[in-house]
Amino acid sequence: MRPLVSMHGFLCRKEGLEMKKDVLAIGELNADLILQGLATVPLLGREILCKNSDLQLGSSTAICACVMASLGLKTGFVGHLGTDTWGKVCETYLHRYGVDTAHVLQEESLQTGLTVSLSCGHDRALVTHQGDTIDCLTADKLPPQPWLEARHIHIGAFFLQTKLAAGLPAFLEKAKAHGMTLSLDAGWQESQTWDNGLSQVLPYIDVFFPNESETCGIGGSDDVRQAALRVHSMMKNGTLVVKRGPQGALAIRGDETIEQGAYKTKVIDTTGAGDSFNAGFLYAYLNNMDLARCLNYGNAAGAVSVTKMGGTSQCPTLHEVENCIRHGETFGS
């Protein structure tokens, strides 16, 4: 990995921007403190023990970006970082996986966000301090001509990025007009109003990646299939992909609905599994594979991810993903 230098506040390659990328990931940056192997979540006034702990790059968008890069997609990132301890952790992991950081603004005045992931077997609870690097992007800070840099844009954690939402439709409309494809991950919304301008953004999106709970919230139904149909109706010509964890995934494109079960795997930690799914799906999508095959790659990337601790400690490789698809299972290394 070539070294990066600070130049006018931005992390830039000494040689300048690389050739056109596959994906430009736009979103939040934070570190993840992962506490793995808890029997239950903590209770006030009591102490519990965990089996393992780790500090690594977190955030939905960044995990997806690193996994896409690990799978072989040329990936760049747009976001903000501090120069504090958490920021240095994030920077190290982005460099490790070869994610281009020419559009990552790094300043001493910024406090990098932190998420504590409490991992209990097949699920986890998250506590996040947003700092200055999660809800910081506004549309005027985005690359003015992204189509000159990449062929696809992925935006993660939509509901966390409240400042970005207002100017996003105009940005996406321009990118779309120049031939770019677009994907979006919802992320959880603490208020559960499921708004933040989503209905104005979805008509531009080619692939939308909510999980099952988010789909039911946005679609206003406890029935995931009914909710999925309602959410899909908010899109123009896009594909809705509902991530269902151990139950696999459901996808709707036009009049076609496909459901695919998850691969058999050994679960160590589910942190970042949905983001790894996004990356696997987008790898196949950007390589012009059909919808069923895209789900194969998404489910396999998610399955490989949960065999490891955290979302970026050991990102799934293309060999691991395709080996999982080939054998119908994965148990990690």
Image (cartoon, rainbow, N blue to C red):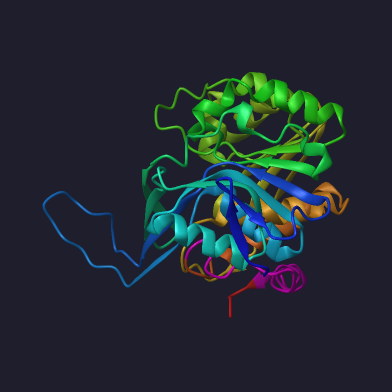
Estimate the x, y position of residue 29 in percent, counting from the top left: 51, 48
State the residue in front, 243 or 185: 185
Q: Dividing the picture into quarters, in which one does residue 254 lie?
A: top right
Quadrant for the C terminus, please: bottom right
Specify whether 293 is left or right of 133.
right
- Residue in the picture at 61% in, 32% down: 141
- The residue at 68%/68% (across/down) is 2
Based on the displayed image, in which of its 4 quarters is residue 237 positioned? top right
Position of 55 with respect to 233 (left or right) is left
Percent position of residue 255, x then y: 82, 31
Compared to 40, does 325 lie above or below?
Answer: below
| Residue at 28% across, 54% down | 41
- Name the residue: 65% across, 34% down: 142
Q: Nearer the viewer, residue 4 or 246?
A: 4
Q: Nearer the viewer, residue 16 or 251?
A: 16
Decide if residue 295 is in sight here: no
Q: Position of residue 140 (x, y in %)?
A: 63, 27
Question: In this picture, is 321 found above or below 20?
Answer: below
Which residue, as the protein is rendered here, is positioned at the far left?
A: 45
Q: Is 327 inside the magenta-drawn segment?
A: yes
Tell me where residue 138 appears, x and y as whole percent: 57, 29
Is the residue 177 above or below the residue 290 in the image? above
* Relative to 144, residue 3 above or below: below
Quadrant, the N terminus: bottom right
| Residue 54 shows in this picture | yes
Q: Please state which of residues 200 and 220 is positioned toward the viewer in this rendering.
A: 200
Count of numbered tags: 0
Residue 229 in magenta stretch: no
User: What range is drawn magenta here?
Assistant: 310-329
Q: Quadrant of residue 183?
A: top right
Furthest residue toward front: 8
